[in-house]
Amino acid sequence: MESVATNCAVCNGSGWVPEPGSFRVRPCDCQDDLRRGLRIASSSIPARYVPHCTLAGFHERNNPSLASAKRRVARLVDEWPMAERGLLLMGPCGSGKTHLAVAALIDIITQGKPGKLLFSNFQDLIQQILASINSDQAPSRTEILEPVLTADLLVLDELGSQKPTQFVQDMLYYIINTRYNENRTTVFTTNYLDDPRDAKEESLETRIGKRLRSRLFEMTERVVVDADDYRKSVSGKWV
Ligand SMILES: [Zn+2]
């Protein structure tokens, strides 16, 4: 096993500690923490979600839909890497969808389960692709898309957040269809519902198109989170 240098006082940064009463050595615990940190970094989870976005750190706030969404994500983590069907976490802004999706990644990493994991914000991804078209300096579209297409488990955050131009819809279809054909698991989050309660709100199908919505039915299980924005206190002020 390759060890990584640390400031660890237990192993003096060697990564190995002697087994008491023998000449053998075993890997120091600091190596697990280090590997976990490296894996979280390579999965592109934004720093603001680390380390508190775990399933244990998710508050159900006495809300049955949050409790049931948490159980469903826990099942995906339990079944990983055998889980094939992804999840479509739908609900209003601030309801905790992204926390749950990130928790799936962090908990899988913490449990030392295998797989290439990746977090991607849909809006940022589209911006990166658009920037690549207008610049020779930026990474090419192929370079940007490669990790998104090949991750064993991808969290695609804020599906439908971009204005649904033809370009955005084509990009999204390419990503989702490639992952579908290669049997890769995807967890989506979206603020858009299938049947919005308010007639003024758009449905997810309006945002991403009929063809994509029906593909999502095949590759994910729908998990609807019905909760208020946790960042608003009772007084209505942002906290
Ligand atoms: Zn150590």
Image: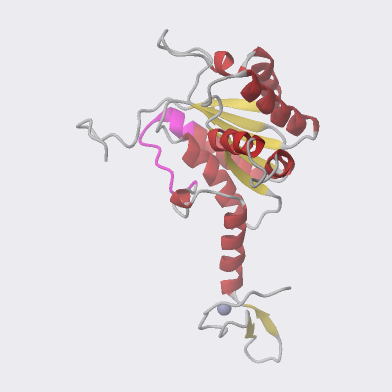
Identify the image quadrant of residue 159: top right
State the quadrant of the C terminus: top left
Decide which of 181, 107 is in the foreground and name it: 181
Q: Looking at the image, which residue sits at the far right?
A: 181
Q: Position of residue 211 (x, y in %)?
A: 69, 15
Q: Position of residue 150 (x, y in %)?
A: 74, 42
Residue shown at the point (55%, 37%) measured from the top left:
124
Q: Is residue 25 magenta?
A: no
Identify the image quadrant of residue 178: top right
Give the answer, above or below, for where 136 lies relative to 52.
Answer: above
Give, as a single range, the part of the protein colored magenta: 55-68
Residue shown at the point (67%, 19%) measured from the top left:
212
Q: Position of residue 78 (x, y in %)?
A: 63, 45
| For residue 180, side relative to residue 38 (left or right) | right
Q: Position of residue 61 (x, y in %)?
A: 36, 36
State the quadrant of the N terminus: bottom right
Indicate how the structure is coloured in the image: secondary structure
Residue shown at the point (59%, 43%) measured from the top left:
119
Number of callouts: 0
Q: Is residue 64 magenta?
A: yes
Identify the image quadrant of residue 126: top right
Ligand 1 lies in quarter: bottom right
| For residue 231, side relative to residue 166 (left or right) | left
